[in-house]
Structures are given as structure tokens and as C-alpha cells.
Image: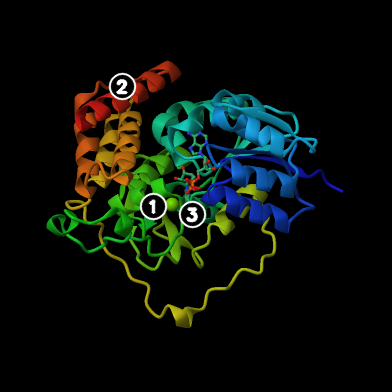
């Protein structure tokens, strides 16, 4: 029998994390769940630990350590608290692959530790590549570590490239659903509510990425993510709105041939492929029926009304720490929007103001990214006052 793959899931209580646990439970002979972690949701973390019996759990919120410890006192499970613990548990010899399913900048440090420890990465946490793509891809190369994309568009590109890794990519098209406000112009976006923004037409996801999808920041972050994953320049990456979310993205090769990957929208598929590449395991998920989708449609993204997409392209052009600054501003802006402190259109405005105000450090080291993130948060919070 071949050895089972030891898995650590950072952010097991989230949308990606819980779907990853569903995937693992379907293939008990292939995977061993070793580590699960949560930010604040101690109750669900405890429930998951009792059900899946991992070797180790981490609750990042230190105030909840006692609660988790007591609830699992009868179990043979190591329990840690705090964000530094994430960096240590990924280094365990039991772990082969780290699925980064936590949200935001918090993914950066544990991912670096995992790469330095030689663990392959199943990357859902796109912010890590947005913040420090150059550093992460360089480290992964040095350590011989693979980064398997979980994001559905990037998984699609990756699947299109299997058997083609020696062929040059002319360009890629990342598809975008357009989110809940597709078709609305700036004046119609002024008064849209948090509840409307949280209703994504095709995917059920965590709050931050759902708002990012409504503002098109998510596609902006994905453009930067694609640049680093597939070693592309900005001019090789295009975005096309495809409201049905059936074609998950496309690659165009030098001979003009295009390959697309398609299927019903279900994140369990890209999660699973990132963990089983190059193999595909049988699933009972519903199959696509052409007659349910007689029309697949495409349109240009509205970059005037949804300014975040252009901000991401600008950040990519400028290089250095600008994308890190943009990401941090956006994390503050989305949080402020979710707490009714700013309006929908003010998200992109705040992002742009912080990006223009803060200094760009070219050829940054890790400390520069950490400083740029902190300064951007400070500036964004100043502007919010
Ligand atoms: P989510 O909010 O549903 O879950 C986030 C998880 O991370 C939770 O377990 C939470 O407890 C934990 N967490 C949050 N903040 C943390 C912190 N500061 N420190 C430690 N742990 C923390 O988010 P999600 O929708 O599952 O998204 C996770 C990542 O995957 C994001 O980067 C997102 O962009 C990406 N992604 C998600 C989807 C999707 O369908 N949900 C699709 C593509 C990419
Ligand atoms: Mg995506």
C-alpha cells in the first residue's frame, strides 16, 4: 500500500476548509488529516477535531485556547494557540501538503514556513501570492516545492497546461462571473448594500472573497496570482466576464489553439485536484448537462465602474511592494464595508488613495513586505477616520 498523504488545513472552519474536509472524508485511503486550524470559530474546530481526529489543532484566537483544550481533553490531540503556532505546525514531519485556506495576509508567514520545511502547497490563499509572489515563487523553486492552485480559475489553467508545460503560453483568459452587480454603472452602485454584495450569483464563499467578487478586486488579485503561478507578464493575462461560471478559464498557445477547462461550479473539484495531481479520483458530483446551459455568454469587464481591476494591473506594472500595499488597503476597506463604515464605491477609492500615498520599495525582502503591509493598514485607517 502506498503511503497516505499527510494533510494540514490552515483555516479548516472556512468555506474552502470545510469543503476540503468533505473531500478528504471521501478518500480515507489516500489522505491522513494531520493538522487543522481556525481563527476564531472554536466550536466548529472542536467538532471537526472530534470527528476527524487529527494529530494537531491550532486556535489562532488565544482567548479560546482553554475552551478547545478542555473540550478535547479526552483525545490524543496536540493543541496550540496563537498565530505563531501556525508557522510551527506546518513543519511537522507528518505533513506532506499544506492547504492554505485561511483568508488574507495572515497566510503569508505560515506559507513561507511550510515552503522552507519542503512541504508542497495547495494554495487557496491567493493573498499570499499577491503580497509577496516574487519571494514565494523564488523560495518554492529553491526548495523544490510545488504550489498547486486551488482557486478555480488557476486550477483550470493548470489543468489546461498538463502535457503542455514545455509549450509557450501566448496568453490566458481568466473568467469572471461579474458578481452580483454585473451590468450596474457607477451611479447605480452608490447605494448598494452589504446584504446585496454578499449574495454571489454562482458561488458560496467566505465574506471577504464574496465582497472582493462584487468589487472585481477578486479578479484583480487573481490576475496577480496568475502572473506568479504561471510566470506571465501583465499583457499575457486577460479577464473575460462569463456569467454562467462553466468555463473556469482558458489558455491560448502560440499556434493560436485554445484550451478551456469547464464543469459545474464546485470548489471541491479544484481542491481535490490540487491534492491528487496528476491523478483524478472518481466523484459522484452532478455532471454538466449542455441542455441546461444552451448559451454560454461572454462580455468585457466594466473597468470604469469597477476600478479595482485596473488598480491590480497598475500594481503589477509597478512591481515592488505596491501589490502588497493594495492588498492591505483592500483588507481594511472590505472590513470597513462589512461593518457599515464605508459605502461600496468607497472600497476602490480607499484602495486607490492608499496605493498612491504609500512608497513603493523595489526588489523587496520579507521585512519590506511586512513593513509595507503595516504602513498600508495604518494609512487606510487614517483615511477612514
Ligand atoms: P472563510 O472566511 O470562509 O474562511 C477562512 C478560514 O481562515 C477560517 O477557518 C478562519 O477561521 C480562518 N482565519 C481567518 N482569519 C484568520 C487569521 N487572521 N488567522 C488565522 N486563521 C484565520 O474564507 P474562504 O472563503 O474559505 O477563503 C479562504 C481563502 O481561499 C481566501 O484567500 C480566498 O480568497 C480563497 N478562495 C476561496 C474560494 C471559495 O470558494 N471560498 C475560492 C477561491 C479562493
Ligand atoms: Mg477564483
Q: Is mark 2 within 8 Å of ligand 1?
A: no
Distance in Å between CA atoms under marks 3 and 1: 14 Å
Q: Which residue is mark 2?
A: 375
Circle 2: element type:
helix
Q: Is mark 3 within 8 Å of ligand 2?
A: yes
Q: Residue furthest right?
A: 1
Q: In the drawing, does residue 355 fall left or right of residue 97?
A: left
Q: Nearer the viewer, mark 3 or mark 1?
A: 1
Q: Which residue is mark 3?
A: 152
Distance in Å between CA atoms under marks 2 and 1: 25 Å
Q: Is mark 1 within 8 Å of ligand 1?
A: yes
Residue 126 position (above or below residue 252): above
The disc placed on residue 210 is 1
Q: Residue furthest bottom?
A: 291
Q: Where residue 263 sits in the image (x, y, percent)? A: 51, 67
Q: Residue at x 24, y 42 (%)?
A: 347
Amino acid at each position: 500500500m502506498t503511503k497516505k498523504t499527510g494533510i494540514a488545513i490552515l483555516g479548516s472552519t472556512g468555506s474552502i476548509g470545510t469543503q476540503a474536509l468533505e473531500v478528504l472524508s471521501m478518500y480515507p485511503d489516500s489522505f491522513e488529516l494531520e493538522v487543522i486550524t481556525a481563527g476564531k470559530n472554536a466550536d466548529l474546530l472542536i467538532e471537526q477535531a472530534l470527528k476527524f481526529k487529527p494529530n494537531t489543532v491550532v486556535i489562532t484566537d488565544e482567548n479560546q485556547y482553554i475552551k478547545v483544550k478542555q473540550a478535547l481533553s479526552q483525545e490524543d490531540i496536540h493543541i496550540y494557540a496563537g498565530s505563531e503556532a501556525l508557522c510551527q505546525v506546518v513543519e511537522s514531519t507528518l505533513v506532506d501538503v499544506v492547504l492554505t485556506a485561511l483568508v488574507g495576509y495572515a497566510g503569508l508567514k505560515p506559507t513561507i514556513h511550510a515552503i522552507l520545511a519542503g512541504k508542497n502547497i495547495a494554495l487557496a490563499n491567493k493573498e499570499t501570492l499577491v503580497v509577496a509572489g516574487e519571494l514565494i515563487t523564488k523560495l518554492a523553486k529553491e526548495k523544490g516545492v510545488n504550489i498547486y492552485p486551488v482557486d478555480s480559475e488557476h486550477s483550470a489553467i493548470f489543468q489546461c497546461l498538463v502535457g503542455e508545460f514545455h509549450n509557450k503560453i501566448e496568453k490566458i483568459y481568466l473568467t469572471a462571473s461579474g458578481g452580483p452587480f454585473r451590468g450596474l454603472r457607477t451611479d447605480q452602485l452608490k447605494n448598494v448594500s452589504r446584504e446585496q454584495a454578499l449574495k454571489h450569483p454562482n458561488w458560496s464563499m467566505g465574506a471577504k472573497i464574496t465582497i472582493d467578487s462584487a468589487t472585481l478586486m477578486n479578479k484583480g488579485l487573481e490576475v496577480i496570482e496568475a502572473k506568479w503561478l504561471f510566470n506571465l507578464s501583465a499583457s499575457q493575462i486577460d479577464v473575460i466576464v462569463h456569467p454562467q461560471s462553466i468555463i473556469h478559464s482558458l489558455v491560448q498557445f502560440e499556434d493560436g489553439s485554445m484550451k478551456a477547462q469547464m464543469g459545474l461550479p464546485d470548489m471541491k473539484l479544484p481542491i481535490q485536484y490540487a491534492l491528487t495531481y496528476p491523478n483524478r479520483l472518481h466523484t459522484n458530483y452532478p455532471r454538466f448537462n449542455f441542455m441546461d446551459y444552451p448559451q454560454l455568454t461572454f462580455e468585457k469587464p466594466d473597468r470604469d465602474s469597477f476600478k479595482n481591476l485596473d488598480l491590480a494591473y497598475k500594481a503589477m506594472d509597478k512591481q515592488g511592494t505596491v501589490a502588497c500595499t493594495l492588498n492591505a488597503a483592500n483588507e481594511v476597506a472590505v472590513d470597513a464595508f462589512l461593518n457599515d463604515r464605508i459605502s461600496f464605491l468607497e472600497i476602490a477609492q480607499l484602495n486607490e488613495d492608499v496605493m498612491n500615498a504609500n512608497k513603493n520599495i523595489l526588489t523587496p525582502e520579507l521585512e519590506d513586505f511586512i513593513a509595507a503591509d503595516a504602513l498600508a493598514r495604518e494609512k487606510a485607517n487614517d483615511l477612514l477616520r
